[in-house]
């Protein structure tokens, strides 16, 4: 029996949870009350949007309402393809600029929806001031009002702190799609954002099906019929089902009747989900049917797609097969999903091995960097394996951070950043060793992997600058890692400069350049030492740094004097530095 036979599509179970929370009832009640208030003001159908804040004991609801009578035609616009691009909005309307990322630099929004949203731009500060972080926030709307609710929710996500505040939930009823694939990716790539959206769609409502070509869904869709409802999250499955589940006919396409039908659905959904028997369809399932296929059929029955008199233009088996393929793909992707927290716990094992390797290297008086660089036998096999695993993890971690919207990917969580800094300071020296063992030069400018650069940038963005080293830093210098993970690249370049100075074939220009670089290297090392930012391991007899010092001392002679050379000439100073007692 294959693994996929044990898969199950959990849309019905998710629908039960949604319905039992009563949030649909609260949201729809707010919309209908806003509709009644608008009607009593003798306002006829228009393209404007109305809004109101409802303060309930256990939540805050912000509702947006548009007259349903003109929604379909207004949504459709120029054939449904009337977009406003993020590049157009970049300077004039910066509210959504944060959604652009390096890997997903642009997106487009439906123009009619954006025009409605921008018409209430002036009241957004007022609406945001009504948000009480101590209570759940529900943002809701019908039809194009749902589009406005979605855009308003997106406008909150940039500054929303998911770590200590309950996330907002946007519930739309009969809302059309609002954006293209770029917008879908911007939201879907960050699961905390994607889970903020729940879209309720009736099988009688044409509006959610108007914008199909060029538009993409995001969030969770609760598809409803007279038989019940089920939730769907995969965008391709949602598109497929929206196209085949519409049961509208000329007599029930009246938008106002569709509007009323949502109230009926909400009123009876609880009973239908819990009590309605929507189990197997005799012609499509039997006891040998795999669980995944059976659960998909059950969902399709609930949303009204599997009927005794099925329209001839719908191949139900083809629909089931497509959804089944998508569910299997999603199961594989979910299994492979990147879990930073789980990964951080697992890679502690590999980091512990590196720490032990570092300790043994120090005991051998050669140092961590040079032991790895100089060993030619098989003793480094395990180290290389652990190094590869750690690098794959942190490359993926940085890649995931960069794929998220800028304000989310701009920094890793504190725990992750701490782990990434330790990784960079521990592993990058080994990459530097491999680089120069291969006879290459210019690691920092030409050979440094981008994930090291990104991790270093993130640390600089969050690290508070320090004036002088504290006592704890001095006391731990013997066991600490060198803060600049490129330190050994500077050492290797200094060794190359020494070689140029002693090489008779070097030109005058090459020697002058080498002298200048060595003076700069002196200052670089001295600055690190003054801040106790370099490990005392660099002074071990077998280290490349001491090799450089030996060559440099021969080149400069006894008459040469500088702050660093004067310090290094006295062995007691190196011992004092290792104890944290060296005074500069």
Image (cartoon, helix red, strand yellow):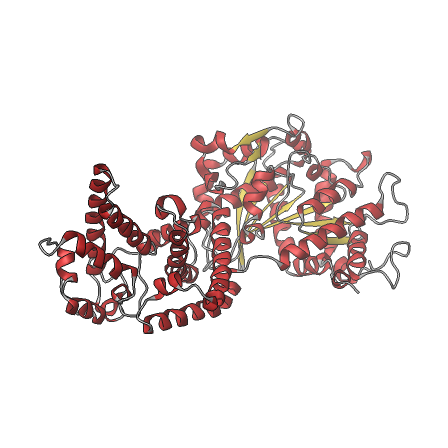
- Residue 215 appears in the rendering: yes
Identify the residue shown where x is 73% and y is 54%.
230
Q: Is residue 74 above or below residue 226?
A: above
The quadrant of the picture occupied by the C terminus is bottom left
**Would you say 431 lies left or right of 239 here?**
left
Where residue 299 sits, quadrant-wise, is bottom right
The quadrant of the picture occupied by the N terminus is bottom right
Residue 107 point in image, percent of width and height? 54, 36
- Residue 159 appears in the rendering: no
Q: Nearer the viewer, residue 449 or 134?
A: 449
Residue 6 point in image, percent of width and height? 75, 64
Q: Is residue 76 above or below residue 386?
A: above
Q: Residue furthest top?
A: 78
So how many labels did they put on this image? 0
Q: Nearer the viewer, residue 62 or 303?
A: 303
Where residue 445 sits, quadrant-wise, is top left
Residue 69 point in image, percent of width and height? 68, 33
Residue 180 point in image, percent of width and height? 60, 37
Q: Is residue 507 above or below residue 491?
A: above
**Would you say 415 lies left or right of 250 here?**
left
**Would you say 544 lies left or right of 63 here?**
left
Q: Nearer the viewer, residue 246 or 519?
A: 519
Where residue 336 sits, quadrant-wise, is bottom right
């Amino acid at each position: 029996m294959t693994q996929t036979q044990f898969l199950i599509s959990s849309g019905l179970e998710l629908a039960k949870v949604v319905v039992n929370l009563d949030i649909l009832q609260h949201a729809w009640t707010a919309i209908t009350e806003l509709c009644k208030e608008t009607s009593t003001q003798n306002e006829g159908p228009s393209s404007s949007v109305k809004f109101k804040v409802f303060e309930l004991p256990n939540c805050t609801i912000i509702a947006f309402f548009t007259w349903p009578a003109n929604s379909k035609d207004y949504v459709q616009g120029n054939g449904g393809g009337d977009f406003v691009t993020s590049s157009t909005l970049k300077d004039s309307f910066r509210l959504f600029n944060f959604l652009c990322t390096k890997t997903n630099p642009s997106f487009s929004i439906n123009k009619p929806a954006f025009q409605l949203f921008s018409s209430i731009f002036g009241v957004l500060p007022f609406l945001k001031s009504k948000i009480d972080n101590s209570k759940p926030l529900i943002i809701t709307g019908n039809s194009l009002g749902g589009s406005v609710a979605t855009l308003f929710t997106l406008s909150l996500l940039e500054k929303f702190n998911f770590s200590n505040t309950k996330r907002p939930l946007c519930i739309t009823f009969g809302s059309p799609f609002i954006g293209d694939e770029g917008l879908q990716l911007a939201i879907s790539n960050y699961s905390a954002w994607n889970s903020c959206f729940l879209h309720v769609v009736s099988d009688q409502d044409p509006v959610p099906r108007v914008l199909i070509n060029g538009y993409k869904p995001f969030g969770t869709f609760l598809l409803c019929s007279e038989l019940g409802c089920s939730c769907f999250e995969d965008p391709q499955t949602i598109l497929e089902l929206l196209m085949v589940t519409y049961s509208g006919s000329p007599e029930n396409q009246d938008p106002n009747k569709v509007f009323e039908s949502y109230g009926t659905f909400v009123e009876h959904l609880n009973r239908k989900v819990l009590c309605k028997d929507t189990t197997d369809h005799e012609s499509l399932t039997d006891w040998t049917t795999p669980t995944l296929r059976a659960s998909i059929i059950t969902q399709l029955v609930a949303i009204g797609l599997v009927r005794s008199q099925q329209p001839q233009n719908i191949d139900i088996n083809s629909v089931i097969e497509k959804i089944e393929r998508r569910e299997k793909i999603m199961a594989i992707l979910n299994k492979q999903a990147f879990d930073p927290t789980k990964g951080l716990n697992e890679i502690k094992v590999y980091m512990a091995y590196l720490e032990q390797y570092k300790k043994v290297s120090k005991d051998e008086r050669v140092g961590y960097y040079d032991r790895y660089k100089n060993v030619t036998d098989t003793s480094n096999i395990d180290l290389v394996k652990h190094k590869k695993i750690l690098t794959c993890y942190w490359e993926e971690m940085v890649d995931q951070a960069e794929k998220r919207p800028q304000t989310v990917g701009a920094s890793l969580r504190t725990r992750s950043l701490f782990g990434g800094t330790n990784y960079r300071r521990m592993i990058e020296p080994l990459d530097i060793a491999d680089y120069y063992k291969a006879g290459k030069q210019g690691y920092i400018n030409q050979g440094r992997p981008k994930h090291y650069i990104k991790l270093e940038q993130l640390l600089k963005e969050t690290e508070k600058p320090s004036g002088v080293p504290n006592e704890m830093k001095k006391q731990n210098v013997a066991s600490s890692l060198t803060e600049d993970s490129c330190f050994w690249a500077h050492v290797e370049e200094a060794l190359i400069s020494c070689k140029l100075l002693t090489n008779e074939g070097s030109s005058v220009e090459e020697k002058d350049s080498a002298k200048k670089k060595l003076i700069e290297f002196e200052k670089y090392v001295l600055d690190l030492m003054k801040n106790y930012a370099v490990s005392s391991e660099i002074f071990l007899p077998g280290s490349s740094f001491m090799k450089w010092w030996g060559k440099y001392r021969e080149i400069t002679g006894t008459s040469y004097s500088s702050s660093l050379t004067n310090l290094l000439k006295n062995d007691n100073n190196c011992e004092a530095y290792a104890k944290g007692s060296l005074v500069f």
